[in-house]
Image: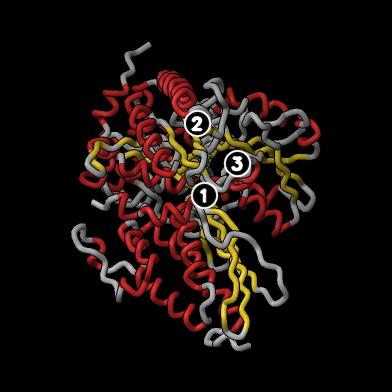
Amino acid sequence: MSAFDPRRVRVDTPLLGRVINGRPITYLDSASSTLPPRAVIEAMDRYYTLHHANVHRGVYQTAVEATDVYEGARAAAARFIHAPGGADEIVFTKNTTESFNLLAKSWGAANLQAGDVVLVTEMEHHANIVPWFQLRDARGIDVRFVPVTDDFRLDLSNLDQLLDGVKLFSFTATSNVLGTRNPVAALARAAHEHGALVAVDAAQSVGHQPTDVVDMDADFLCFSAHKMLGPTGLGVLWTRAAILASMPPFLGGGGMIADVRLDGYVPADGPTRFEAGTPPIAETAGLEAAIRYLDGLGLENLMAHEQTLTSDALARLDARFNGRVRVIGPANSVDRGGVLSLDVDGVHPHDVAQVLDQFGVCVRPGHHCAKPLMRRFGLAATARASFGPYSTVADTDVLLDALDSAVSMFG
Amino acid sequence: MANLDDLYREIILDHYRSPRNRGELDAPGVVRTEGYNPLCGDELTVFLDVRDGIIVDIKLTGHGCSISQASSSMMSAAVKGKTVDEARETIERFKQLMTVHQTALDDRAEPVVADLRTMGELAALQGVVKFPVRIKCATLAWNTLSQGLDDAYGVQGTGSQ
Ligand SMILES: Cc1ncc(COP(=O)(O)O)c(C=O)c1O
C-alpha cells in the first residue's frame, strides 16, 4: 500500500483553510460536491493563462493546444473508467443529470416504445427518475422500481419478475442518501440475462472507489467531475462505441455536425455528435488533473480510508447518542460508502444543520433529490454528513460535539 | 457574526416544543389551504373558520423545522379572534419584519423594523433575517394564511362573504 495520508490531501486543498464562525471549517458535504485540490485549480488557471482558445476550429498554436487539452481529458476519462473503446466512448456533458437526460432523450427516444419498461430503484436520485417519467409521459413507456428493504438495501427477492420485459435497468452504484453500495456487476448480469441494457449512476462512486465499466458489465455510465475533486459544469456519459454510433443527436447546433445545407444537416460521428456548442474546456483540464490526483492517492486506498471513517463514525454515533441520532442507512460499513444521513430525534434536519454551521460543520439538510426514498422511510429530510479523501476522524470529533449541542439545545 | 441565540430565542423554542392551535377543523365553511417549502420539505395546512369577517378559529397541521413550526404557531395565536382586515395587516407587518434590509447584513446593525413594539411576541422572529436562508421557513405560515384569506374571501375582500 502506498502511504495514503488524508493530512497530505488537506494541505493540498485550499478551501480547508477557511475559518467559519471562528472555527476551522469541517467539511462533511462531499456527497454534494467535493473540494478541489490545488492541482485542479491550477490546471484550470494554467489553461486560461496559457492555452485558451475555442476547440476544434482553429489552426493557430493555442487553438491546437486547447483542443489537445480537451481531447486529452477525454482520453484520461476513458482510462479512468477503463472504457474498452477508449476516448471515442466518452461524451462530455454538463453533469450527471445531463448525462441521464441525454441517455433518455437520445437512446431512450430512439429505442423505447409505448409499453417498454425502464427499471430503476427506489433509492435513485431524481436525475435517474425524472427523465424516465418524462419519457413515460411523452411516449407511454413504463417505469418500474426495485424496492428498498428495511435495512436499506435493494430488495432483490423479485428481481427476475421485475426484469421481465425490461429494456433498460438504470441504477445507482452508491446511494447518495443511504451510502448503500449496490452489487453492480451482479445486477448487470441479471439484467443482461433478460435482454436489458444497464445504465449505472456513478456520481457517488467514481471519486471513492476504482471504476471499471467492463468489470461492472455496464452499458452506460453517468458521472460528474465535481464529485471527484474536479470542477462543476462538467459531466460524462460513457457508453460502448457501437451503442453510441446508433444514438441520434441530442442538442443541435455547432460542433455536433458533419455538414449543414439549406435542406438539412448531417450529424458528426462519435462523441462530438452530442457536444453542441462551445463546451466547457477549462473544466476538462480540471477533470484531467483530478483524475491524476485521484490516481496518485489510489482509489483502493480512498475506499479503505472512507470505510475506516464510516465504521468509526457509526460506532461513535451509536455509543454517544444511544439511538437519539438514527443513521438512515446500513448499520455497518460493509458494502457502504461514507454517507451518513442523520435523523436526530426531535430536531429537524434544518435546525441540526444550522447549529452545526455554528461549529463550522458543513452538512446538508433536505431530501437530497431522492424524495421517493425519503417517503419510503417516512422522512421529509435528513441531515447528511459525507466523507471525502481529506476527511479525518477529527472531522467526526467536531461533528459529534456539534450534534451534542443541537440535541441539548432542542432537547 | 450572526449568533444562534438571535435565531433560536426562548419563545421560539417554546412555540416549537408546544405548538399552539394544532389540529384540523371540519366545520362547514372551513377553508383549508396548503403551503409548501420545496427547499426543506416543510409542509403546512391551515384551516380557517371565518364568520362575519372574524377568524373565529384556526388550526394547523404539518411538519417543518423549528422556525417554520414556531412561526406558524405564533401566527395562529396572533390572528385567532381577529378580523380578516386585522389579520391582513399583521401579515403585512410580519412581511416587513422579514425583509432583509442592507443593515441586517451588517453584523453590528439590527434590522430596521417599522415598530417592533406593536408586534408582540412575533418580534422574537426578527433574528431570522440575519439567517437569510431561513426567511422562507418563517414566512411559509404567513404566505399560506394570506393565500387562504385570498382564496376564500377575495384578494381585497373584508371577509364579509
Ligand atoms: C447519485 C447521484 N446521482 C446524480 C446526481 C446529480 O449530479 P449533478 O447534480 O452533478 O447532475 C447526484 C448528485 O447529487 C447524485 O448523488
Marks 2, 1 in one chain: yes
Q: Please tell me whether mark 3 or mark 2 is closer to you in this view.
A: 3
The type of residue carrying mark 3 is Glu
Q: Can you say whether A309 is above or below B143 in the image? A: above
Percent of width and height locating residue B14: 44, 53
The type of residue carrying mark 2 is Ser
Label 1, ligand 1: CB separation under 8 Å: yes
- The residue tagged 3 is A124
Percent of width and height locating residue A88: 50, 37
Q: Can you say whether A134 is above or below A162 in the image? A: below
Marks 1, 3 in one chain: yes
The type of residue carrying mark 1 is Glu
**Which numbered circle lies on residue A198?**
none
Q: CA distance from mark 2 to mark 1?
A: 17 Å
Dot 2 crowding, Cα within 10 Å, few <14, some 14–19, many 20+? many
Mark before the other along the chain sequence, 3 or 2: 3
Mark before the other along the chain sequence, 1 or 3: 1
- The residue tagged 1 is A98
Q: Left of A343 or right of it: where is A4?
A: left
Which quadrant: the C terminus of chain B? Answer: bottom right
User: On what subunit does the disc labeled 1 rest?
Assistant: A
- The residue tagged 2 is A205
Q: Which sits in the foreground, A189 or B146?
A: B146
